[in-house]
Image (cartoon, rainbow, N blue to C red):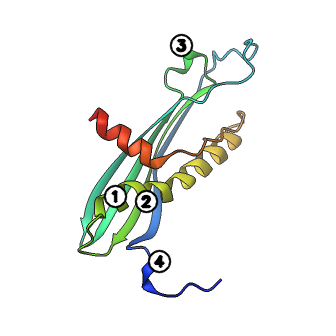
Amino acid sequence: MKIEGASIKSDLKFRQYIVDYVRFETNYNYNYDSEDDKIGINFNIDREVQEIGDDLYAVSLIVDIFDDPKEENYPFTMNLKLTGIFELESDIENSNDLLEKNAIAILFPYVRALVSNYTANANVEPLILPPINVIKMVENNKKHK
């Protein structure tokens, strides 16, 4: 497939991503003999958008997985922050949409891979985060702020 023309090129360019931090803590009190063999995935996502230069933006995803592991009988808790560096063509009308929705949609697969690989290497059952509806997430976060 050959792609021609500027009409389908995005005004948002993804330069790189950085893992700012990963915090993982095992719950030694986790009851592996619990009646529930399946654990419901409990995670929260927040975002930060920051202009870092001319037409350059840092978009961060902050993810908290399994809050209160001892009280809720989760095997671990995990917190991470992943930041993407994006370049945005200047004078774009929908720049907030591109940064809030498209950048998050670009970054979330990296978060999913990081969580899956980290949990597999931590010798717990690998956790695969489900895909998310980025548009609904952004809209819901705007309602709660």
Mark 3 neighbour density, 10 Å: few (under 14) some (14–19) many (20 or more): few
Dot label at residue 71:
3
Q: Do the residues labelled 1 and 3 touch (CB within 8 Å)?
A: no
Find disc 2 in the rendering and name its residue.
102
Q: Are marks 4 and 1 in contact (CB under 8 Å)?
A: no
In this picture, residue 126 sits left or right of residue 54: right
- Which of the pair 19/135 is nearer the observer? 135
Q: How far apart are marks 1 and 2 (CA)?
A: 7 Å
In this picture, residue 63 sits left or right of residue 87: right
Residue 84 position (above or below residue 92): above
Q: What residue type is labelled 4?
A: Ile
Q: Which amino acid does label 2 sit on?
A: Asn
Among the two numbered marks 2 and 4 on one chain, the one whose residue lies closer to the N terminus: 4
Among the two numbered marks 1 and 3 on one chain, the one whose residue lies closer to the N terminus: 3
Q: Are marks 2 and 4 in contact (CB under 8 Å)?
A: no
Residue 142: image quadrant is: top left
- Which of the pair 31/2 is nearer the observer? 2
Residue 23, horizontal then vertical, whole percent: 50, 38
Dot label at residue 8:
4
Residue 116 position (above or below residue 27): below
Find disc 1 in the rendering and name its residue.
97
SS category of the residue bearing label 1: helix
Q: Distance between the residues labelled 1 and 3?
A: 38 Å
SS category of the residue bearing label 4: helix
Nearer the observer: mark 1 or 3; the answer is: 1
In this picture, residue 54 sits left or right of residue 43: left
